Image: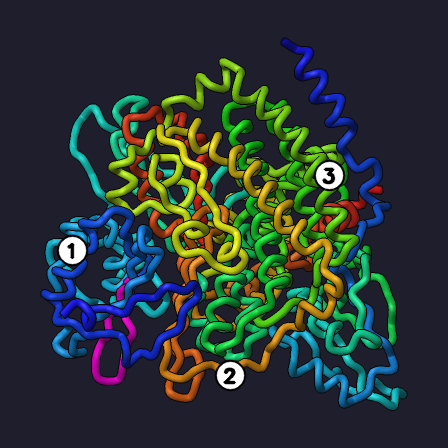
Amino acid sequence: MPLKEINILRRHGRQYVPDLRRVELRGIFRGRPVISGDITEAEAELVTSLCPVGAIGVTSVASGMEHASLAMDLGKCVFCRECEFALPRMIRFSNDFKMATNIRERLSVVAGADQPVRLDPEMIRKEIRSFFKHALKLRQVSAGGDNSAEMELNAAGNVNFDMGRYGIEFVASPRHADGIVITGPITQNMAEALQICYEAVPSPKIVILAGTDAISGGIFGGSAAVNREFFDKYPVDLFVPGNPPHPLTFINGVLDLIGCK
Amino acid sequence: MKENKYIELFSNPATLLLEDIPVLEYPDFVAFIDLLMGEEGTHCVAYFVLPQPDKYRFICCMAADENHAILVFSHEQPLQPAPSLPSITAKHFQFHVFEREIHENFGIAFPGHPWLKPIRYPFNRSEVANVMNTYPFYTINGEALHEVGVGPIHAGIIEPGHFRFICHGEKVLHLEIQLGYQHRGLESQFVEKQAILQQSVLAENIAGDTAVGHSLAYAMAVESLAGITVTKRLSIERIIALELERIGVHIGDTAALCIDIAYQFGQVVNEALRTIIINTTQFWCGNRFGKGLIRPGGTNYPLTADIMAEIINNLKEVEERFLQVTDRIFSLPSVLGRFEGTGKLTTMQASLIGAVGMAAKSSGMYRDIRWSQPFSAYVDHPYEPVMLHKGDVWSRAMLRKLEVEKSMAVIRELLKEITHDENPESDVRHPDYDLHLAPSSLAISLVEGWRGEICHIAVTDHSGKLSHYKAKDPSFHNWMALALAVRNQEISDFPLCNKSFNLSYCGNDL
């Protein structure tokens, strides 16, 4: 009988991605966008009006710069790539999946600057790295999430990505958790449960937002059924953009946050 | 006489003028539903209120599967005094969700409705005093009974919902499911956001696990309103995407069913296979769930020769390994011991509640939009649904396996048809975000997603702007199937039963 299992396992082979820090994604992937510095004002206006979520805007003229600068907010972007299709020579979504950061403003991609999105280590609360570097247990709360971000968070622990190798795991109870991972724009109907769950996590605790919906409300940002008062009360430790965020984006962001190599 | 009672639609999607929809007196409306419900395979796909300045217009769409038709008819009621209409649910239980939704949104009374409870606590509900934690749960008094409340936040990484069990020892006597935690004001958003691109993005974010299914239903509805037809090539590409989505989820669900019976071997092998499928979708369009792939009028991601080769190779690899592992899963006594006879939904129950999709097909009901109201490439490629009859967890697991095989065969057949296209690029157009929708019209589109029947209805005002939108996920009907299936089961089998249906909360904004 076990022969069948052995045969299946032989075909199954080694599934885990050996180095999650350095992976090349095959084919196309809608990762960190790069905007050319040559983009004209008219072109900037075109994509600004095209964007379905208002993620693209002209930033105020920086001192010493002649042109108004175009910026794309990855916290609002739904990664539809329509701006690239409109201006393929000016905007390009790269394969760079490392887009997570602890500073909301760093999610702003500015025209002419092909800079990676990184965390600011100075701004990470000291207790995060001293407590959670080797083991981080997280409680997930879906608050209006569309189930794609939730599935990608599940996938982060599967045989391929296996983030358990770093001691990072999702747990069943907030009482067992060091922090919460929120998906979805936060519906009014889920706001109270989210609050209760957050309070049930022992301190020190962290808050991670996974996906555009969680970071800005995404396409549901203006809806009357959404209640984002949670963010008036509590700080956020990590923003993970994406629609949904790729498991590699999430895992790399968390590793950078807790200071794991 | 019969002609003016309803409009019969034989295409999917279909558009009709609002003024052409016959208006019946309520008693005639009910009598007509009585008549239709007496026929085999007839079921309600949509029943909703179109509020107008001076009246409520109730529109009903019934699918007559045997005739491959959709019947549309309506009745009207004054705004004041608030209408009170004898419940249709009292006689035809499958109307319960529709009447509950209408009651909650507009405060219309349905005397005789056996279960007139809140459904999602929408922000624009008629009775704002009703809030989530005042939900009127059914109770049974008895010293030997206890209640178990689970959720809204669950142990795993899943969407929120509240389950209230009434148990006798380990045995579940009754389960009531309270939803609404995921309510994002979805249908209102379609009206607030008028740009076609915004609405396309909304559609693919209705339910991320059914991004292709819902965005296809939306695209079909607005294309129909705009009077455009897509190329044959594009309709084939869309169905390939839809079937890839089905394969990916079904394999992932097979893994998840193995988790719930602690069969780790089956879990990890299937997880890895699902990864190959969704990475194929990413290879095609840059998103593992196919978001951005379906757009009205055309696509940004034509299916190139490279992608076709990738699909063929990956399907071959996955099929061999999937058959190998499922052969093992379905022959292990310890698996069969948990799957067989667990969480049974009888054919009669399925029919009574108007079950659709997988839940219906695994309980012996012949119900599949690909067969009954063929759309897109299915118009030229007839589909015969996979059928099973026992209605237990085994049937729902086995149905997934059989549908994976069938979907792979469908994709291969469709690929064969387009492989030798002379000039494939010219045959697929770019998306059209500048559609002019027919004014004062209603479009209905039906898509068989992996869960079952998705129904989108778009209504325009006199200027051709969307004025009302309905997006229905198969889960709308099937949540009741889960509640019935766990009766008399051990409460410890609930996770297994739940996963075997794998229903969506956000798909209906619930």
Label 2 crowd bin: few (<14), some (14–19), many (20+), radius 10 Å: some
Mark 2 belongs to chain: B
**Mark 1 and mark 3: Cα distance apart in space:** 55 Å
Q: Is residue B170 magenta?
A: no
Q: Which residue is mark 2?
A: B436
Mark 3 belongs to chain: A
Which quadrant of the view contains residue B265?
Answer: top right
Q: Residue at x 61, y 52 (%)?
A: B240
Q: In this rendering, does residue B510 appear at all?
A: no
Which of label 3 and label 2 is nearer to you? 2
Q: Main secondary structure of the magenta part?
A: strand
At label 1, the amino acid type is Leu
Q: Nearer the viewer, residue A40 or B396?
A: B396
At label 3, the amino acid type is Phe
Q: Give whichever of discs 1 and 2 has the lower sequence position.
A: 1
Q: Secondary structure at mark 2?
A: loop
Q: Which residue is mark 3?
A: A161
Q: Secondary structure at mark 3?
A: loop
Q: Is residue A1 above or below residue B156?
A: above
Q: Position of residue B141 (x, y in %)?
A: 16, 33
Q: Which residue is mark 1?
A: B35
Q: Nearer the viewer, residue A201 or A2?
A: A2
Same chain, labels 3 and 2: no
Q: Residue at x 47, y 40 (%)?
A: B154
Q: Position of residue B383 (x, y in %)?
A: 48, 47
Q: Is residue A173 left or right of residue B470?
A: right
Which quadrant of the view contains residue B4?
Answer: bottom left
Q: Which portion, as a residue range, is magenta?
A: B47-60
Same chain, labels 1 and 2: yes
